Image (cartoon, rainbow, N blue to C red):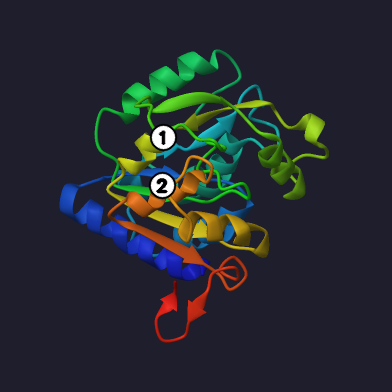
Amino acid sequence: MSRAAASHAAEALQGCISAHGDARIIAATGASQIAFLEALTSAPGIDWSRVEMFHLDEYVGLPLEHPASFRRYLLDRVINKAGVGRWHLLDSDHDPAGVAERVGAELARRDVDLAFVGIGENGHLAFNDPPADFTTDQPYLVVTLDEACRRQQVGEGWFASIAEVPAQAISMSVRQILKSREIIAVVPDARKAAAVRDCVAGPVSPEAPASILQTHPNTTLYLDADSASFLACDTARGPR
């Protein structure tokens, strides 16, 4: 699944760079994206010096040195490894509202070519937990994380207990994600199966934030057998 998604993403990146001279991307983080990003940054033929990358979300008040810092994650797994030409990270240690405004202004300056996203165990898209705000036009929001989201971070091993998980984060807004020309969503693991069912087979609803991807004209969802296990499937027609 990760290799297939990375092959798709690499081709899309190469196409953007060939057509426009550069590519603007949004990168998700978390355990579910590690294999995908490893495969993507190892793919040949991508001129990463022509890539401009934006941060999808970050905890408020978590220092760069913390193992769960998404800034550290992107620096180690993408920016420094691949040689990304330009990047905009969410330095949320101080003045998160100001950071959201400043990075958001830069993000809104031009269209994003390609967004890499995941789906949370509670159906969240970025850190937009249910009920998500489907109406705001702000590029980034300071949000309060719900308990299910915080427990997921503990379950993935980023924190020892829920008490250690920050209560707030800076998150790209739902409407801003949808402004991307193309979206690739990578969603592995059985623990995501219920969220995948609700967001793919259920109605578009703020209670299942990633269900909004159903409305985007150019989104591809990559699942493995476990994450797709709650979807009814016909071998001739695929999931329904």
Q: Which mark is residue 103?
A: none
**Alpha-carbon distance for marks 1 and 2?**
8 Å
Q: Secondary structure at mark 1?
A: loop
- Quarter of the image with the C terminus is bottom left
Q: Quadrant of residue 226?
A: bottom right
- Callout 1 environment at 10 Å: few (<14), some (14 to 19), or many (20+)? some
Front residue of 221 and 93: 221
In this rendering, the answer to whether 55 lies above or below 20 is: above
Q: Is residue 216 left or right of residue 73?
A: left
Name the residue rendered at 54%, 18% in the picture: 96
Q: Which residue is denoted by mark 1 in the rendering?
A: 134
Q: Secondary structure at mark 2?
A: helix
Name the residue rendered at 48%, 48% in the picture: 210
Residue 129's spot in the image, x, y percent? 57, 37
Residue 216's spot in the image, x, y percent? 32, 50
Q: Amino acid at mark 1?
A: Phe
Q: Which mark is residue 212?
A: 2
Name the residue rendered at 63%, 31% in the picture: 145
* Residues at marks 1 and 2 touching, judged by CB atoms closer than 8 Å: yes
Q: Is residue 186 visible?
A: yes
Q: Amino acid at mark 2?
A: Ile
Q: Is residue 86 visible?
A: no
Name the residue rendered at 25%, 45% in the picture: 22
| First of labels 1, 2 by sequence position | 1
